[in-house]
Image (cartoon, rainbow, N blue to C red):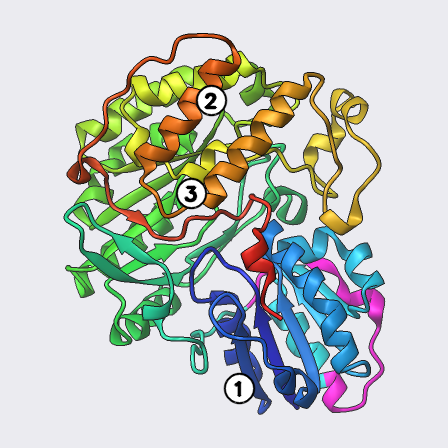
Amino acid sequence: MNVLLVSTYELGHQSFSLAHVAALLRDQGHSVCCLDLAIESFDGAQFQSAEFIAFSVPMHTAARLTARLLYEVKQLSPAVPVAAFGLYAQMNRRYFSSLGVSTILGGEFEAQLVDVVNNLQNDIQLDSQGYTESHLAKQSFTIPDRKGLPLLSEYATLQLSDGGRKTVGYTESSRGCKHHCAHCPVVPVYQGKFRAIPLHIVLADIRQQVNSGAEHITFGDPDFFNGPTHGLRVIEAVNREFPQLTYDVTIKVEHLLSYSDLIPRLKQTGCAIVTTAVESVDNQILTRFAKGHTREDFYKLVELCRQYDLNLSPTFVPFTPWTSVEGYLDLLKVIVDLDLLASISPVQLSIRLLIPPGSYLLHSPEVQLLIGPEDSKNFIYPWKHENPLVDQLQRDIAGWVQKSSCQSRYRIFSEIWALTHKLVDIKVPKIREPSERDVPPHLSEPWYCCAEPTEDQFNFV
């Protein structure tokens, strides 16, 4: 069967999901084409020649882009079965079904997706109910087949402090998460479960990417220390085989503090960036999010990472129903006081809390009073701040970040700093401009999974 696998946005990385599904389908004898619309142009002929089309929908931005694309696809190929897989496919299954998507899978979806294609190949009637749900049973992994995807050099790069750059590969060593952070999209699908990918598979995938030019690897695990023993085995094995290879990981504040004895090993094995979801410096908001850390823990972590010269890259959800203008200004001051201005991607200063279907935030009576009816087309339960100035500030900052994405982090931060001070009628304090060498290594992708798509991202047709 001719299968077309499509990715719309995966944070500037070559898609692990497409490559893994492609390997499994090709092992079954199917012909597979992969299309990454974040890099490649839309080609209607590819959709018209396909007998089965499957979209990777791992995050909010990808869901919005996929939904926009589905109308065009159904016009081109009205009779071709369409699937969607990934976190946001599962959480938004009702809406995707209304758009003509017949197979919707989340969690450990690959085996079920292969079953669907095999059944179609053999003219077996599908039990649609069995293919619109999350599957969490342990599965067998294989080495991803990256044939047909764009070259790694066409994706985001690692920008170095000296002005150099490295070609970046992407892999995963685990999925799911043991925690239940209330705002996190992983939680409704995995429900506290965590799945490790075998070490030999991870190594083989990294090996083939190094052979294709990768000089740095992003580990896409929701939390690399969900299984600290597994994570340590992975980075030590990778470092033994590829001592010059650098990498980045995502780890909770709580885990970095709990496993602080592993921080030196991260540095010694080539970790260039540790991304951590700080989300807020307001302890009440952190409690609502069930993050498991406090403002004071964040301060401790910054000091700990500096002790070992480990580059910490915090992420935030700065705009929530409980954020005041003064609270937002407090966040900016914390960033300045901790000398983190150069470590934070500007888009992180514009993120507005998303409450998708299935979010654990919906369990809160307080949140139920704040939200409006589900906005299926935008994959959220909408909310408005009680102070319209907060919503306007967020819109202004998001617009500024989007149009200024090619400017320096300092320039963008300075504009946000000035705007916020003026809004509360406070004289704008001067802030130190970091030198180019003060800017730590960072990935060149300017956008983020939880930000709304830009108009440029929508222009793929």
For label 3, count other residues whose C-alpha is less than 10 Å away and answer few (under 14), some (14-19) or many (20+): some
Q: Earlier in the sequence, mark 3 or mark 2?
A: 3
- Determine the secondary structure under disc 3: loop
Q: Earlier in the sequence, mark 1 or mark 3?
A: 1
Q: Which mark, by number, is residue 419?
A: 2
Q: Which mark, by number, is residue 27?
A: 1
Name the residue: 57% across, 25% down. 393
Q: Which mark, by number, is residue 307?
A: none
CB within 8 Å, label 1 to label 3 = no
Q: Quadrant of the N terminus?
A: bottom right
Name the residue: 39% across, 8% down. 427
Q: Which mark, by number, is residue 404?
A: 3
Q: Nearer the viewer, mark 1 or mark 2?
A: 2
Q: Which residues are magenta?
A: 119-139
State the CA–CA distance, disc 1 to disc 2.
Answer: 56 Å
Q: Position of residue 402 (x, y in %)?
A: 49, 44
Q: Nearer the viewer, mark 1 or mark 3?
A: 3
